[in-house]
Image: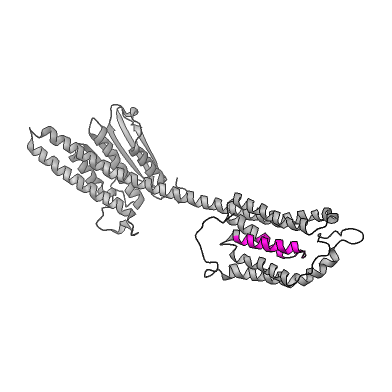
């Protein structure tokens, strides 16, 4: 089974020497150093006159390690240099060298560590199904020496070797699979978090664009309707309406440019742009005046004791008033609104009330939902519906002056 296509990376990239080459060299040195020891020990582990000993089974008359054994164990160990970048290739080389080593009849030893580490690398870095197939192929290859190296009379005893051989594959495979699944879970969690941030930013920009463009177009539409209505009877009024349209469109374009500049690709902060207008409580008077030119009577009252607001709350107050007045321009049959802004020690309170014959019959649209979301992001609340007086529509928002921490934000 060939390895799937992946971006090719150098086996010994800068900085990877200690991580890739040193462990492989240490294992190769261990295997070569222990070959004489396990060769002598294998002579004592073999079956005796009273039957097999309780120690790990080895082939009868096990072959003493020689130069061929040294080459095989060195090959299996040094293949681990590529275990992170070419895990399947590493497993094939290590398994092939170890299988030949066992078929020839050399005794068990640290060479099986090379196979175990290669199995772990495949389970860690390849899909579970692919890794499971390679683990089974590896186990089958390690079992070949039981058929080719053992006599029929001792084959029963030799089958005990299935247990330790399976452990050299099953245990590293389980550990590698667990690490693979944990890494996948962390990766998915990061991707989900990134997606939530992207969606939140998209929603924020959509709300800003909706507030700016919706308000500007509503004012322009009303002025255009006025100009069309009085073009024959009051030509002067048409000229005033056109001036109002020009002013409203210019204001909307400036605010739209400010909003879109927050996502400028050069990464600069739009708030540092002295040309871009900054929505805030200081500009609510101009906002109400612009709405008045659109034909809506606006009664504005701002608490004279109100001090400077935090930037986020300042923008939120402006946008809530802007969207509320836009709804009055677009939907109210009686174009009149009362705007009240009152600041307390820990919160600022915004109230917009207008006359509406059917205040309970409105379905919340994107504008009202956006205002609620804007208030919630600051840890505040916003209600919109029938007002305390009969036949009135009432928007009431309470915004804390201290913004919540990121963990508390919805």
* Quadrant location of the C terminus in the rendered image: top left
Quarter of the image for residue 215 reads top left
Q: Is residue 83 left or right of residue 375?
A: right
Q: Which residue is drawn at 63% across and 54% down?
A: 134
- How many marks overall? 0
Q: Magenta stretch: residue 307 in it?
A: no
Q: Considering depth in this image, is 265 or 149 the residue closer to the camera?
A: 149
Q: In this view, does 352 lie to the left or right of 223?
A: right
Question: In the picture shown, does residue 408 fall above or below 365?
Answer: below
Quarter of the image for residue 261 reads bottom left
Q: Position of residue 347 (x, y in %)?
A: 38, 46
Q: Where is residue 72 in the image (x, y as percent from the top left)?
A: 69, 67
Q: Where is residue 194 in the image (x, y as percent from the top left)?
A: 45, 51
Q: Magenta stretch: residue 100 in it?
A: yes
Q: Residue furthest right?
A: 50
Residue 180 visible (yes or no): yes
Q: Considering depth in this image, is 193 or 402 the residue closer to the camera?
A: 193
* Quadrant location of the N terminus in the rendered image: bottom right
Question: In the picture shown, does residue 254 fall above or below 45?
Answer: above
Q: Give the range drawn in magenta.
A: 89-117
Residue 347 visible (yes or no): no
Q: Where is residue 300 in the image (x, y as percent from the top left)?
A: 25, 41
Q: Main secondary structure of the magenta part?
A: helix
Q: Residue at x 25, y 48 (%)?
A: 283
């Amino acid at each position: 089974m060939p390895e799937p296509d992946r971006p090719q990376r150098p086996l010994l990239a800068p900085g990877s020497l200690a991580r890739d080459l040193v462990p492989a060299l240490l294992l190769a040195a261990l295997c070569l150093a222990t070959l004489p020891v396990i060769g002598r020990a294998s002579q004592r582990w073999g079956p005796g006159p009273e039957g097999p000993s309780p120690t790990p089974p080895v082939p009868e008359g096990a072959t003493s390690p020689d130069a061929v054994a040294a080459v095989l164990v060195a090959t299996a160990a040094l293949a681990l240099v590529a275990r992170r970048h070419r895990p399947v290739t590493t497993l094939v080389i290590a398994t092939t060298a170890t299988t030949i080593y066992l078929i020839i009849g050399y005794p068990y030893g640290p060479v099986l560590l090379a196979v175990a580490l290669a199995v772990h690398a495949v389970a860690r870095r390849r899909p579970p199904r692919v890794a499971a197939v390679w683990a089974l192929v590896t186990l089958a290859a390690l079992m070949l020496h039981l058929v080719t190296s053992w006599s029929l009379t001792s084959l029963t005893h030799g089958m005990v070797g299935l247990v330790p051989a399976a452990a050299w594959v099953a245990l590293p495979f389980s550990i590698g699979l667990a690490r693979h699944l944990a890494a996948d879970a962390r990766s998915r969690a990061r991707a989900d978090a990134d997606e939530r941030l992207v969606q939140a930013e998209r929603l924020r920009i959509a709300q800003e664009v909706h507030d700016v463009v919706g308000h500007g177009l509503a004012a322009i539409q009303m002025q255009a309707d006025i100009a069309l209505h009085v073009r024959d009877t009051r030509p002067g009024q048409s000229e005033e309406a056109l001036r109002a349209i020009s002013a409203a469109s210019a204001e909307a374009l400036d605010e739209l440019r400010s909003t879109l500049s927050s996502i400028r690709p050069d990464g600069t902060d739009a708030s540092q742009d002295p040309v871009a207008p900054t929505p805030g409580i200081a500009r609510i008077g101009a906002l109400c005046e612009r709405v008045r030119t659109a034909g809506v009577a606006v009664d504005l009252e701002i608490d004279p004791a109100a001090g400077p607001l935090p930037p986020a709350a300042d923008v939120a107050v402006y946008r809530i008033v802007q969207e509320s007045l836009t709804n009055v321009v677009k939907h109210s049959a009686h174009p009149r609104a009362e705007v009240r802004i009152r600041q307390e020690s820990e919160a600022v309170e915004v109230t917009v009330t207008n006359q509406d014959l059917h205040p309970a019959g409105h379905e919340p649209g994107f504008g009202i939902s956006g205002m609620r979301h804007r208030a919630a992001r600051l840890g505040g609340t916003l209600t919109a519906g029938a007002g305390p007086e009969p036949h009135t529509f009432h928007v009431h928002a309470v915004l804390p002056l201290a913004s919540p921490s990121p963990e508390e934000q919805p």
